[in-house]
Image (cartoon, helix red, strand yellow):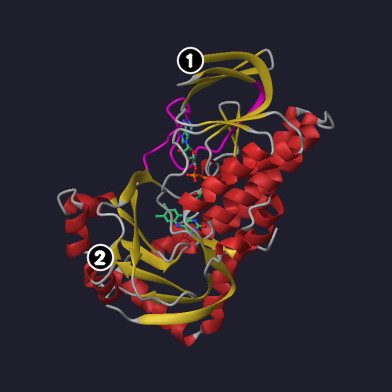
Amino acid sequence: MNSEQKQYDCIIIGGGLAGLTLAIQLAKNKRSVLLVEKNRYPFHKVCGEYISMESWDFLQSLGANLEELNLPKISQLRVSAHAGFAIESDLEMGGFGIQRYTLDQRLAGLAVENGAQIIENCSALDVQLEDGNYIVKTTKGTFNAKLVCGSYGKIDPSFVKRKGERKGKYIGVKYHIKRSFPDNLIELHNFKNGYCGISKVDDEKYCLCYLTTTKNLNASGNNIKQMEQNILMKNPFLRTYFSESEFMNEKPIAISQIGFRKKTTYQNEVILLGDAAGAIAPLCGNGMSIAMRSSKILATHLEDYFSQRIEKQTLIDRYTKEWNTNFSFRIKTGFYLQKLFGKRLSTLWMLKLLNKTPRLLRKIIRMTHGEKF
Ligand SMILES: Cc1cc2nc3c(=O)[nH]c(=O)nc-3n(C[C@H](O)[C@H](O)[C@H](O)COP(=O)(O)OP(=O)(O)OC[C@H]3O[C@@H](n4cnc5c(N)ncnc54)[C@H](O)[C@@H]3O)c2cc1C
């Protein structure tokens, strides 16, 4: 157990894309940073692993050196309804594919190179604010800081108390597979109460990842394989992918009790970013970019705070205002789009309409994405 007297400028709870990119930016500004992450890098995460191109320049500016990974660039979208009716579109900005296993580890390395301290296999258990000093209790000791940021993802740790909070009704499941599939294509296939994406990532693998409801899993005796057989494989595209691919891992990785909506940017004295502040429906393919962009916005305001140009309340107010301007509309759009998907008839009607009005389809895609940052 470690109980340090040192006061860090900032403790970051959770080392996904939001937390890691924030740690790198603060460390580059010579702020003392401690990031605690409950897992050990590298590790796999449930995620479709398609990153909108809007984040490319930002990642490069941090030193991610993505060019050397020869990543697939994705410029085409195909979406199918439950029985296989499919439409296609160009993706104006497009994206690239990279495993979280690869990207998060690379960013963790960069954070340390720039002077941040990372403690792995370490869960934050509690945060208290006493006389302007934050005390963070973790499974590996107690640490002090001037400020604490929470980038712990979609599921709140037990010390976070939100009023009227209900558990999310969705589950996410991910596999890496090998098969023949175009490098530049991302597909999204609907099935009853869910959708499944497939696109290429690094290391000649393909990410096959879906979102569905806990109800679907319960109806299949809580058996993922059974659910895939009974429900997902009714879509002819998914029948092919699930029955004719080489699966790199026998068991998928899965998460449960997730929801997608705007939350708050400040909770229990902690400033929130990434999914902890609000998660967008995965069908928009934009959660990772929102997580990274929120870290960029926050890093700017934190620098003003640490340089004593602004008070803490001004920091919170300015960050919240900018967060809302950038993400509220996108998250709402994703929420309503997700409501249309999953239902057999509404999905089919919508795809038939979009097939006849490609400009509308392009507009919807644009509404879920942002500009480069
Ligand atoms: C099924 C599915 C598919 C998706 N597909 C895509 C996609 O293709 N493209 C896209 O852009 N987005 C996608 N997303 C969304 C994307 O994965 C998230 O928006 C993104 O990971 C958010 O990053 P984050 O850093 O906020 O959280 P995370 O990446 O979830 O990181 C949070 C970190 O905090 C750690 N943590 C949690 N609690 C504690 C604690 N108490 N103490 C210490 N550490 C803690 C966790 O271990 C984790 O590493 C998808 C999401 C789902 C569910």
Query: Which quadrant of the structure image shows residue 82?
Result: bottom left
* Crowdedness near tag 2: few (<14), some (14–19) or many (≥20) residues, C-alpha within 10 Å: many
Residue position marked by numbered label 2 in the rendering: 232
Query: Which quadrant of the structure image shows residue 127?
Result: top right
* SS assignment for the magenta stretch, majority: loop
Question: Which badge, 2 or 1, comes first in the chain's sequence?
Answer: 1
* Residue 155 falls within the magenta-colored stretch: yes
Left or right, residue 155 beside residue 367: left
Residue position marked by numbered label 1 in the rendering: 1
Residue 171 vertical placement versus 85 (above, below): above
Residue 174 on image: x %, y %? 35, 55
Write the residue at 65% across / 45% down: 295
Residue 328 on image: x %, y %? 59, 52
Residue 212 on image: x %, y %? 32, 56
Write the residue at 55% across / 13% down: 3
Outermost residue to the bottom? 356
* Crowdedness near tag 1: few (<14), some (14–19) or many (≥20) residues, C-alpha within 10 Å: few
What amino acid is at disc 1?
Answer: Met
Left or right, residue 136 beside residue 224: right
- The reply to whether the C-beta atoms of the residues labelled 2 and 1 are less than 8 Å apart is no
What amino acid is at disc 2?
Answer: Leu
The boundaries of the magenta stretch are 145-168
Residue 350 visible here:
no
- Separation of residues labelled 2 and 1 (CA atoms): 46 Å
Residue 149 vertical placement versus 24 (above, below): above
258 and 45: which one is in front? 45
Residue 134 on image: x %, y %? 62, 19
Write the residue at 46% across / 63% down: 201
